[in-house]
Amino acid sequence: MDFSDSSIISLVDKIKVEMFVDMDVYSFVAPSAYDTAWLAMVPDSRSPVQPLFMDCLDWVLNNQREEGFWGDIDGHGMPAIESLTSTLACLIALKKWNVGESAIQKGLDFVRENAEMYIEEIKDCCPRRFAVIFPAMLEQASSLGLDNILPNHVKDTVHVMDIFIEHRRIVEKEELVETYHYPPLLAYLEALPPNKIDKDQIVTHLSSDGSLFQSPSATASAFMITGNKDCLAYLKAIIQRCPNGVPATYPIDEDLIRLCMVNHLQRLGLAEHFTKEIKNMLTSVHRNYSTNHRSTVKDSNLLHLYKDSLAFWLLRMNGYIVSPGSFCWFMQRGDIKDRIENNYYDDDFSSVMLNVYKATDLMFPGEEDQLEEARCFARKLLENVISTTSGNQNHLHKLIGHELKTPWLARLDHLEHKMWITQEHDSTLLWMGKFSFHRLSYDNSERLTQLAVQNYKYRQSIYRKELVELKRWSREWGLSEMGFGREKTTYCYFVVAASTSLPKHSDVRLIAAKIGILITVADDFFDEHASLDELQNLTHAIQRWDGKGLSGHSRTIFEVLDDLVREIAKKYKEQQEGIDVSDSLKNLKEQKSGKKNFVLLYLKENPEAEIEDAIEYVGEIIEKKKKEFFEYALMDGLSELPKECRHLHLACLKVYQMLFNSSNRYDSNTELIQDIQEAFYQSPDPEIGVSSSKSSSIKSTKKPVSLPQHLSFKKQNNQTTSYYHSSFDYRGSNNIAVKWASWPKWRVDGYNKSMFVTPKFSPCFI
């Protein structure tokens, strides 16, 4: 199917009306079948034979999935593991009121057919919440006559027995409320045996809104045990606010929902279509942070840390002023650090540490003390998570591995968008709750994924057309048939297109790619092919901007450069009130000393030093300059360059990090081929879920897409000496060079005309 601007704009407008006009942030979050079922179990005190909240019971009856389960589906359309406990809770609610016999049977069939598969998935690391709730739901279902829910061959397995043993250990050893476990055991009141229940403790720990840890299910249980009027008022407030299914937490932090929605839109590559909505949501969050800033955190709810670290990342990335202290406060709280270190393997803790680790990517000068300490703390725990779950990883563990393996600065936006669209990582996950992850509601997820697929495919079609045009340009000028050096037409276009979120019909991609191609050809000409006379003649020709007397490859390089300058000047003149900048471009001065190799300079000044010392020294300089660069690129008021240009420079830095982060990918003939396939040719269609009864044997059906024949790469001998460091790359070359790597500055009658402005550039970084 072909997509167009008009079809995408039409879908965007529809989504804006359905989701963002008169925005109800609660509608973004999927209801919790588990918590809704628990409210459905509450009897009416005036008539105990019927439920107090009939709407909740009706919701249970009307929201069973076709496969027989209740609860969330993941980004692949498959039942999440929490569907086991959600289904059991719904079965208990239906059985309690003797309704929905056929639904009960379908639910039992689902549990019996799929329990073994889900239990196998968590055999190496059973989440605490699952160990608390699952055995309790089985026992409560059995007490109502729902026997033999688990087949004998499942019930007698060592994995099931281990879960029951862990359940008993937790119930017997843990206090109802203690320092080292979150959520506290009392938050799972509905799953606790009678001998563990203390009415006084329940009432003592009720919040001012009448809830027990803002948990609808625990509060429903608390009301059935105590009859407390505040609990009842809380439950009624939930029904009034959320008539179409109860959320897993109430009230939900609305700023957290806004942050998660912005994060979701950016991950899918949709930020360009929702700039106003994103700005409104982030401005609201930033305003609340500014007015409600807390120098100390009174409670130790990990949700605060999850939200604060996510807010830091999104606000700073979008140019808002925010302090590292807004989320690094936890490093001053020994009780919280101890709790995290004792429970890091639980998804709720590891998801928080992942946010903290990601937030520390955006480090400005002078912030090292706070952010480096938090980064080291988070990375150590995340590495432990991966090492203990290497055999059977869930979506969160895979995402952690992705973050640790490839630095954010070395990842390209276009490929990251595809990763989230195709659900390689479950994009419906929002944040961790007491019982499970809060997820984006199914309808909203479907709408946004549909738009993201169309948007990505449309971009791919544009990129393919532009690549054909670029290859034609390179061939007509003879750049691709020089007979020496590297043929990098496709590479140059790939890194430009995949690293930025330029508008679909932007001239900048082709201009930047042409510059990259010319730089590569000229670099190889100077390094490998030209004589000293040819190098001097070409350099002098560029200095006087006159190609007379040049011949062969020297003449070709000069003529391409001259034509490219004319093209850039023409584009600029069309967009900037007729200003001609061609002379400014031609007068760009080279560094007569050539490329400065800092490693060699350091060794020259410190002859006793080893090469490793020099690399370490230069690495420290680079890391310092990166922090300064981030601040200039992201924050207003520090540079004359407009934000669009600053973000384009940031995209260039990401390209260099991707190419040279751990090896020289640019000079490889093979390393980027798969990435190019992903970016331009492979469809981003999400994986489609299948019946849950077959899910244990699901394997990806994607086949590798062959690289189109026109994407050929010449294999050349590379004579450039390179030095590599684990966290940066430095490539040094001793030669004379034409310096043509960045947009030039010039001054033309005023502040706003003193720099090159990229045409209609709207950036977005993952």
Image (cartoon, helix red, strand yellow):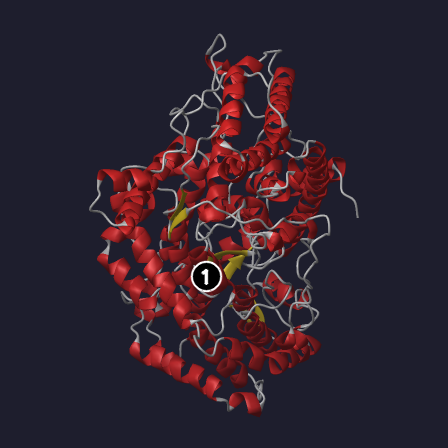
Q: Is residue 665 above or below residue 150?
A: above
Q: Position of residue 259 (x, y in %)?
A: 48, 45
Q: Position of residue 375 (x, y in %)?
A: 33, 52
Task: Residue at 67% x, 68% y: name it.
Answer: 65
User: Could you tell whether 270 is left or right of 336 in the image?
Assistant: right
Residue drawn at the location 35% of the way across and 60% of the way down: 206
**106 in relation to 6, above or below:** below
Displayed quadrant of residue 761: top right
**Residue 77 in the image: above or below residue 521:** below
- From the viewer's perspective, is 132 left or right of 261? left
In x, y percent, where is residue 586? 53, 17
Circle 1 sits on which residue?
401
Q: Nearer the viewer, residue 337 or 190?
A: 337
Task: Residue at 65% x, 47% y: name it.
Answer: 452
Give the amino acid type for the residue marked by disc 1 in the picture.
Gly
Q: In the rendered image of this protein, does residue 757 appear above or below residue 468?
A: above
- Label 1 Cα crowd, 10 Å radius (few <14 / some 14-19 / many 20+): some
Dot 1 falls on a residue whose secondary structure is helix
Task: Identify which residue, 193 or 597, lies in the foreground.
Answer: 597
Q: Residue furthest top?
A: 749
| Spot occupied by residue 159 in the image (x, y as percentages of width and height) | 47, 84
Judge left or right: residue 492 versus residue 657.
right
Q: For the point 43% across and 84% down, which residue is it?
A: 162
Q: Nearer the viewer, residue 240 or 24?
A: 24
Residue 504 visible from this viewpoint: yes
Q: Is residue 226 visible?
A: no
